[in-house]
């Protein structure tokens, strides 16, 4: 279903889900998902690990959305450079603000030293912007790929990624346990389009969104996709539990991401959202960049305040979920007010 101004409702919903999970990724409740000992009930361990694995689809979902929107049209170099410069300035400004909000002061030499490597104190969540700038710089070349890509090519990418980042590391994990060894793939083995997230996800996102008729996934096919979503997550949980929480297995993250993308698209396509819900989703979706930029700053003050609810609320994960809702509301309201003010100023200047 398409909402106001040609917006696709399933992309709006996916963007909101991804934004929520990005915020959850930087909370004590998420971190605690991987903090357990031998006495923890196994069902509780697997529940927390399941949530932990699910949270990691956050940025890959953004990558897929970026791919289907950006790589669906010709890309002009001048427009691309302008957008790249814009996001560099955004990254620089918000990294400065987040650093000051986190430390209470600005130590300029330290900021300069850590900015290039995405190690600025308080600005860690902005690593996605570094990746996004990289995507912008590569976009023209990825566009050459998507102009010719077929659905069969997309399936090939998914199969190769399954083998390279999923099956082979899984086999090595067991062999290393049995042989007490350190078997690993050579660092010189670099099939970039399969293994580098900021290339793989945009291309596959474009392919699955633009080349696959999602309505054809009805019946057993969508049930298979749902099963893949659950099994990939549970397999990562089992492998992490087997190897220990200090070695979280991420080899099937892409299957969780792709499956979630298709599930959301399918159900919103075959059962369109009510118009009022679609408009609300479009509004919240339009605020997600502002939420993403302001939450690391606001979170310095809001996060400790909300997490005081624990242990009165015994589940730290639940408290972190509540924090995410509050943070998205506060930061979304701030972004909305900024957008309204910007439009009022622009209208005033046109008079």
Image (cartoon, rainbow, N blue to C red):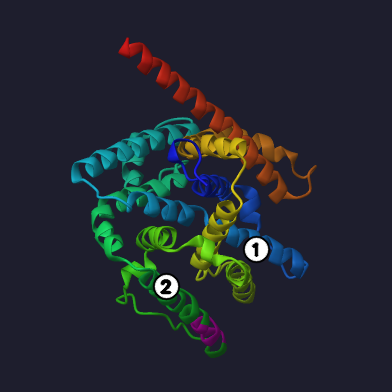
In the rendered structure, does residue 174 fall within the stretch colored magenta?
A: yes
Asked whether the beta carbons under mark 1 and mark 2 sit within 8 Å of each other, the answer is no
Q: Which residue is mark 1?
A: 50
Residue mark closest to the camera, 1 vs 2: 2
SS type, badge 2 = helix
Name the residue: 32% across, 44% down.
Answer: 113
For the residue pair 313 and 79, the one nearer the viewer reads as 79
For the residue pair 77 and 215, the one nearer the viewer reads as 215
Outermost residue on the top side: it is 351
Query: Image height check: is 131 above or below 248?
Result: above
Query: Image height check: is 4 above or below 172?
Result: above
Query: Image height check: is 177 above or below 34?
Result: below
10 lies left or right of 157: right
Q: Residues within 10 Å of mark 2 (few under 14, many from 20)?
A: some
N-terminal label among 1 and 2? 1
In the rendered structure, does residue 255 fall within the stretch colored magenta?
A: no
Q: Which residue is mark 2?
A: 155
Q: Position of residue 135 (x, y in %)?
A: 32, 53
Q: Is residue 257 visible?
A: no
Name the residue: 40% across, 76% down.
Answer: 160
146 lies left or right of 120: left
For the residue pair 210 and 249, the one nearer the viewer reads as 210
Residue 202 is labelled as none
For the residue pair 221 and 302, the one nearer the viewer reads as 221
SS type, badge 1 = helix
Name the residue: 32% across, 66% down.
Answer: 149
Magenta-colored span: 171-177
């Amino acid at each position: 279903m398409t909402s106001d101004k040609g917006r696709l409702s399933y992309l709006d919903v996916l963007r909101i889900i991804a934004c929520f999970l990005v915020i959850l990724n930087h909370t004590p409740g998420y971190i605690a998902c991987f903090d357990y000992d031998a006495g923890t009930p196994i069902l509780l361990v697997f529940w927390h690990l399941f949530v932990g694995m699910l949270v990691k689809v956050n940025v890959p979902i953004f990558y897929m959305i970026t791919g289907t929107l950006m790589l669906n049209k010709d890309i002009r170099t001048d427009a691309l450079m302008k957008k790249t410069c814009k996001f560099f300035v955004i990254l620089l400004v918000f990294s400065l603000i987040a650093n000051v909000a986190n430390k209470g002061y600005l130590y300029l030499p330290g900021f300069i030293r850590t900015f290039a490597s995405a190690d600025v104190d308080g600005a860690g969540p902005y690593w996605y912007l570094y990746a996004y700038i990289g995507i912008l710089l590569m976009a023209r070349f990825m566009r050459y790929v998507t102009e010719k890509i077929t659905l069969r090519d997309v399936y090939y990418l998914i199969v190769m990624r399954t083998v390279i980042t999923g099956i082979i590391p899984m086999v090595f994990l067991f062999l290393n346990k049995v042989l007490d060894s350190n078997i690993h793939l050579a660092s010189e083995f670099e099939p970039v389009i399969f293994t580098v997230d900021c290339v793989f996800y945009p291309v596959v996102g474009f392919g699955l969104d633009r080349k696959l008729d999602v309505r054809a996934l009805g019946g057993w096919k969508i049930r298979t996709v749902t099963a893949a979503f659950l099994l990939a997550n549970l397999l990562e949980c089992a492998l992490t539990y087997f190897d220990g929480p200090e070695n979280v297995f991420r080899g099937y993250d892409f299957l969780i991401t792709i499956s979630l993308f298709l599930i959301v698209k399918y159900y919103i396509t075959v059962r369109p959202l009510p118009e009022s819900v679609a408009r609300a989703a479009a509004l919240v979706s339009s605020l997600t960049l502002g939420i993403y930029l302001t939450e690391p700053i606001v979170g310095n003050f809001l996060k400790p305040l909300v997490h005081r609810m624990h242990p009165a609320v015994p589940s730290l994960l639940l408290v972190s979920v509540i924090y995410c809702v509050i943070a998205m509301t506060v930061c979304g309201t701030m972004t909305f007010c900024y957008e309204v003010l910007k439009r009022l100023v622009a209208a005033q200047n046109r008079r």
